[in-house]
Amino acid sequence: MTATDPLTAPGAVAATPAAAPGARQVWRRLRARRAALAGACVIVLLALMALAAPLLAALEGQDPDAYHADAVDSALGGVPIGSFGGIGADHWLGVEPGTGRDLFVRLVYGARISLGVGLAATAVQVIIGIGVGLAAGLGNRLLDTLLSRTTDVMLALPSLVFAIALLAIVPAGFPRPVLLVLVLGLLGWGGTSRIVRAQTLTLKSLDYVAAARLGGSGRWRVARRELLPSLAAPVATYTALLVPSNIASEAGLSFLGIGVKPPTPSWGQMLSSATTWYQADPTYVLLPAGLIFVTVFAFTTLGDGIRTALDPRAASRVPGRARRRKEARA
């Protein structure tokens, strides 16, 4: 790999201090993209729902693990009684087939697992990726070669297969959400590392970095004070795209039965148990699947908006009010 290697993140751009936009400029560009703002609002609402899960459960008067045998028809194998999965005043989104557990409460508690695992795994990936990428970009040729080849191996590994193997052999008593965070985080830092290394090789040849090193600053002081601020744009963009990927990975692993175990609710685990009921109770399939889709779509849209807002070339693609007035007069 050389300093001119392309970045692995979609649409990622090189950031230099001269080109990095200020906070107000970033906010103005982001505000001009209504789709990104809508995605951010959806993410905030989902986060508030997850944080307020106990309050919402108390408001409905239901418990996520309480069985309601009177809400399902045992003669039909446990199909919810009533229309649309048993929706009513007592169960706002119906009940879970077979068990009668309240679906609304399990969905809001499941948001804690799905969002928590996705965000925590992303944090682990970004921290490791930044550390390895900076070490490779600032180190000598031997260290760079060693860390770069390690990164290539991590990117080439079939992460899903390794995750399935690791999750299958870990004792059942180990907390599954924590295990998912560790597995996804330790297997998925390669992309961040490659981005940071490529940017570091580009940035360290600039005059202001050379001046800092000539002034007596050590490598890690230069990294902390000179390089990290310039790395914020590509790393933030890639991070926003990693979160939905990790949420989908958690859902997929739970769907395969090796992620979160019942009775702990998670959207992927609920979707896994819903596959046997899709004909008798389509609502039970559509609700967790819909939440996963909306969450992934919101994070992806926000990530695209952040990429455009941090891109110095975005000014020519996102016109301001004055430019729109000028074009209207023309």
Image: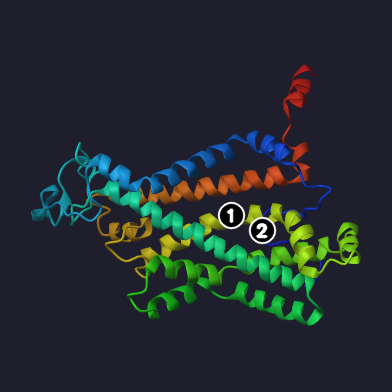
Question: Which residue sits furthest top?
Answer: 329
What residue is pinned by disc 1? 241
- Residue found at x 22% / y 48%: 95
First in sequence: mark 1 or mark 2? 2
Between 149 and 41, the one nearer to me in the picture = 41
Q: Secondary structure at mark 1?
A: helix
Question: How many other residues sit within 10 Å of disc 2, few (<14), some (14-19) or many (≥20)?
Answer: some
Q: Position of residue 262 (x, y in %)?
A: 28, 64
Q: Quadrant of residue 166?
A: bottom left
Q: Judge left or right: residue 71 versus residue 275.
A: left
Between 94 and 208, the one nearer to me in the picture = 208
Residue 316 in view in this figure: yes
- Residue found at x 56% / y 49%: 300
Callout count: 2
Q: Secondary structure at mark 2?
A: loop
Q: Position of residue 102 (x, y in %)?
A: 23, 49
- The quarter of the image holding the N terminus is bottom right
Q: CA distance from mark 1 to mark 2?
A: 8 Å
Amino acid type for the residue under numbered disc 1: Leu
Q: Are marks 1 and 2 in contact (CB under 8 Å)?
A: yes
Residue 93 in view in this figure: no
- The quarter of the image holding the C terminus is top right
Q: Is residue 224 above or below residue 102?
A: below
Amino acid type for the residue under numbered disc 2: Ala
Q: Is residue 56 above or below residue 117?
A: above
Between 310 and 10, the one nearer to me in the picture = 310
State the mark number for residue 9: 2
Between 212 and 111, the one nearer to me in the picture = 212
Q: Position of residue 93 (x, y in %)?
A: 27, 42
Q: Quadrant of residue 270?
A: bottom left
- Residue found at x 20% / y 38%: 88
Question: Which residue sits furthest front?
Answer: 216
